[in-house]
């Protein structure tokens, strides 16, 4: 798998588009549907099927010098209007994959919302914007939204 480097600013811009689209029911009728930031075009990132094969598997999250282990708990396909499968968005052929990943880890080793270097056996290493979700407990849950256009 080819290593892809993306700036934090570009990832945050792409994630914001995905978050707004998810919150508002999609990008239908919006010019943004054909002008997504380059970060939203996640070349080299594992696909929905790659992640589905890794349900229950451990992932390593690099938080500076600290490696934190999390487990992939769920992979949920999402539908976002305005990003049809096999269309062209900004000159790039889309796959139409949009999905949510839910991870869990020990609350004692939690980390804040940010872009992290993540790795797992079978999919290699890639950058992923991860957000802690849920309340306090012995486990901390994290979510990542993937929009492969």
Image (spheres, rainbow, N blue to C red):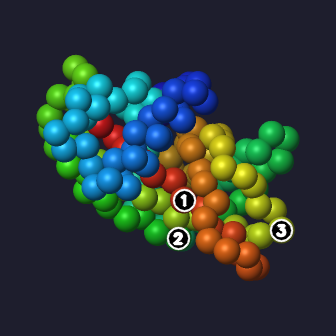
Q: Position of residue 114 (x, y in %)?
A: 66, 44
Q: Residues within 10 Å of mark 3 (few under 14, many from 20)?
A: few
Identify whether 93 is placed above or below 54. Answer: above
Residue assigned mark 3: 108
Residue assigned mark 2: 73
Identify whether 22 is placed above or below 27. Answer: below
Question: Does dot 2 land on a helix, a strand or a loop?
Answer: strand
Residue 96, by quadrant, is: top left
- Marks 3 and 2 sit apart, C-alpha to C-alpha, by 18 Å
Q: Earlier in the sequence, mark 2 or mark 1?
A: 2
Q: Earlier in the sequence, mark 3 or mark 1?
A: 3
- Marks 3 and 1 sit apart, C-alpha to C-alpha, by 18 Å
Residue assigned mark 1: 143
Question: Does dot 1 land on a helix, a strand or a loop?
Answer: strand
Quarter of the figure that contains the C terminus: top left
Q: Is residue 145 left or right of residue 82?
A: right
Q: Position of residue 87 (x, y in %)?
A: 14, 34
Q: Residues within 10 Å of mark 1 (few under 14, many from 20)?
A: many
Residue 63, by quadrant, is: top right
Can residue 44 be seen in this snapshot? no
Q: Position of residue 121 (x, y in %)?
A: 57, 52
């Amino acid at each position: 798998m080819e290593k892809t480097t993306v700036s934090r600013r570009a990832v945050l811009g792409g994630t914001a588009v995905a978050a707004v689209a998810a919150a508002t029911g999609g990008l239908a009728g919006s010019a943004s549907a054909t002008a997504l930031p380059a970060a939203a075009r996640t070349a080299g990132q594992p696909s929905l099927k790659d992640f589905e094969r890794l349900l229950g598997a451990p992932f390593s999250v690099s938080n500076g010098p600290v490696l934190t282990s999390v487990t992939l708990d769920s992979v949920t396909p999402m539908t976002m209007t305005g990003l049809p499968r096999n269309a062209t968005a900004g000159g790039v052929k889309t796959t139409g994959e949009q999905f949510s990943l839910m991870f869990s880890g020990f609350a004692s080793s939690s980390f804040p919302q940010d872009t992290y270097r993540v790795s797992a056996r079978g999919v290699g290493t890639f950058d992923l914007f991860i957000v802690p979700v849920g309340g306090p407990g012995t486990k901390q849950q994290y979510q990542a939204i993937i929009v492969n256009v």
